[in-house]
Structure formats: C-alpha cells, structure tokens
C-alpha cells in the first residue's frame, strides 16, 4: 500500500497574491529594472513557471501590481468620502 499523499496544489488566487506581494517587495527594494522574475518567484515560494502562468511578462506583473495599488487607493478615498458625507452636522448656537 502506498502511503504517500498526493501534493496539494496552491490555489491560483493564492499564487497570484503571493507573487504580487513578492513583486512589490522586489520592485521597492531593487527597482523595476533590477528585479528579476527568478527572484520574485523565489521570494513568493514558487517556480518561475508559476509566475508566468499568472503573468505573461515582468511588465504584465508590474501593471497588475500598479492596478492593485490604484484600486486600493480608490477604495480608501471612497471610504473617506462616504464617511465624511455621513458625519453629523451641528447647528451653530443662536
């Protein structure tokens, strides 16, 4: 009887999340030009193939990261605007 369990595959969303986190770290510390897909993959804990299965190139990875960062800032600004719109107003003392 074989008692070796089959390897479980990391969900695609988790791979993408970890690759984006690793890319952000590498781009910040080394700059875009010096960061490599090999190093990003290593930092994320995956192979270079896993990176390329989610992103076609380093440019695609950068733009996905940029899109993520812009989306987060839009969400934060929207939340602040919504909170400001719901603040109670007080009448001046007459």
Image: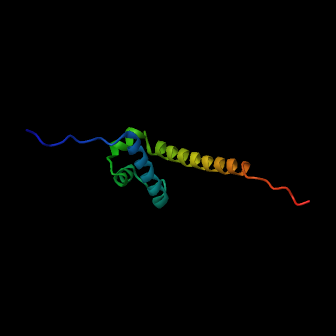
Instruction: Examine the image and state in which quarter residue 26 appears.
Output: bottom left
Q: Which of 86 and 55 is in front in this view?
A: 86
Q: Which residue lies furthest to the right in this view?
A: 94
> From the image, which quarter does the C terminus lie in?
bottom right
> From the image, which quarter does the N terminus lie in?
top left
| Residue 72 locus on image (x, y percent) | 57, 48
Q: Residue at x 46, y 45 (%)?
A: 61
| Residue 60 locus on image (x, y percent) | 48, 42
Whether residue 9 sits left or right of residue 17 in the image: it is left
Q: Which residue lies furthest to the front in this view?
A: 94
Q: How many labels does the image show?
A: 0
| Residue 18 locus on image (x, y percent) | 40, 49
Q: Nearer the viewer, residue 87 or 8?
A: 87
Q: Which residue is drawn at 50% across and 43% down?
A: 64
The colour scheme used to paint the residues is rainbow
Instruction: Examine the image and state in which quarter residue 8 appears.
Output: top left
Q: Which residue is drawn at 31% across and 47% down?
A: 47
Q: Which residue is drawn at 12% across and 42% down?
A: 3
């Amino acid at each position: 009887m074989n008692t070796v369990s089959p390897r479980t595959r990391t969900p695609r969303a988790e791979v993408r999340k970890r690759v984006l986190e690793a890319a952000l770290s590498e781009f910040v510390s080394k700059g875009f030009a010096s960061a490599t897909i090999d190093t990003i993959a290593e930092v994320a804990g995956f192979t270079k193939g896993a990176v390329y299965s989610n992103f076609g190139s380093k440019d695609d990875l950068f733009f996905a990261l940029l899109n993520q960062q812009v989306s987060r800032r839009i969400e934060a600004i929207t939340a602040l605007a919504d909170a400001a719109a719901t603040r109670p107003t007080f009448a001046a003392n007459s």
